Amino acid sequence: MAGNRSFKDYVADRFYNEVFAAIQSYTTDNYDDLDLKLYRVRNIGGIELSDIEVKFVSVNDLPGMKIEFDVVVETELEVRESDYHYDESENCRQWFMLTCSGDLACNLDDFTISSVTEYSSKNRQPKPMSDSLVPIIYKEQLESVATDFLRRHYPEALKTPMAIEPQVLAEKNGSYSGNERNYKGFLCFWTAILS
């Protein structure tokens, strides 16, 4: 995933076959219960998945390097009439949501799909992350996130008002190991948060 910054694109490329198979299985087993917009087919006799497109991925951060995420997919389905007198079929589009999980520490080699449902609305993730897997911090959370970070990595700054030395903070956090580029990114990020 190093060269690709979009998690949606990474999931679409790497797990295309798994997502396709899960949706094919779900539609085959549940075609009577699907809310499809059909105009020519009255009674579904068979359904086949033609194509899928990942529309977006909603990620929730878990402890360690684990994540859970919802993959929203638009599908193209070919639906056949059950009454052999009509010999009708038509194509339609339907959106599905797959609930997945995995561990980034092993490059999602443990990727699992726990459920497939028809998509109705985006789930609100408790600890959301962007498409680049950066935690999303809302402005009303900034104070508590910064306090929590300082409590873990620079507790003396909470006891006595003082200027925070970015290099000392980076060393305590383990972000500074002599790599100037990483340090500058860390410095910019926490300067913005703490100011």
Image (cartoon, rainbow, N blue to C red):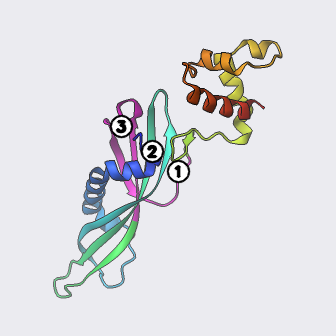
Instruction: Give coordinates of residue 87: x percent, y percent.
Output: 19, 85
Which residue in the rendered view is the most extreme toward the bottom?
A: 85
> The residue under label 3 is which amino acid type?
Leu
> The residue under label 2 is which amino acid type?
Phe
Question: Which is nearer the eye, 160 or 119?
Answer: 160
> The residue under label 1 is which amino acid type?
Asn
Part of the protein shown in magenta: 95-124
Q: How crowded is mark 1: few (under 14 residues within 10 Å), some or many (20 or more)?
A: few
Instruction: Give coordinates of residue 157: x percent, y percent.
Output: 76, 16
Q: Is mark 3 on a helix, strand or loop?
A: loop
Reading the image, the residue beneath label 1 is 123
Res. 69 image quadrant: top left
Instruction: Give coordinates of residue 19: x percent, y percent.
Output: 31, 53
Q: In which quarter of the image is the N terminus?
A: top left
Reading the image, the residue beneath label 2 is 69
Look at discs 3 and 2 and give the one toward the viewer.
3
Reading the image, the residue beneath label 3 is 108
State how far apart marks 3 and 2 are (Cα): 12 Å
Q: In this view, does 150 lie to the left or right of 82?
A: right
State how far apart marks 1 and 3 are (Cα): 21 Å
Q: Is mark 1 on a helix, strand or loop?
A: loop
Which residue in the rendered view is the most extreme toward the right?
A: 161
Look at discs 1 and 2 and give the one toward the viewer.
2
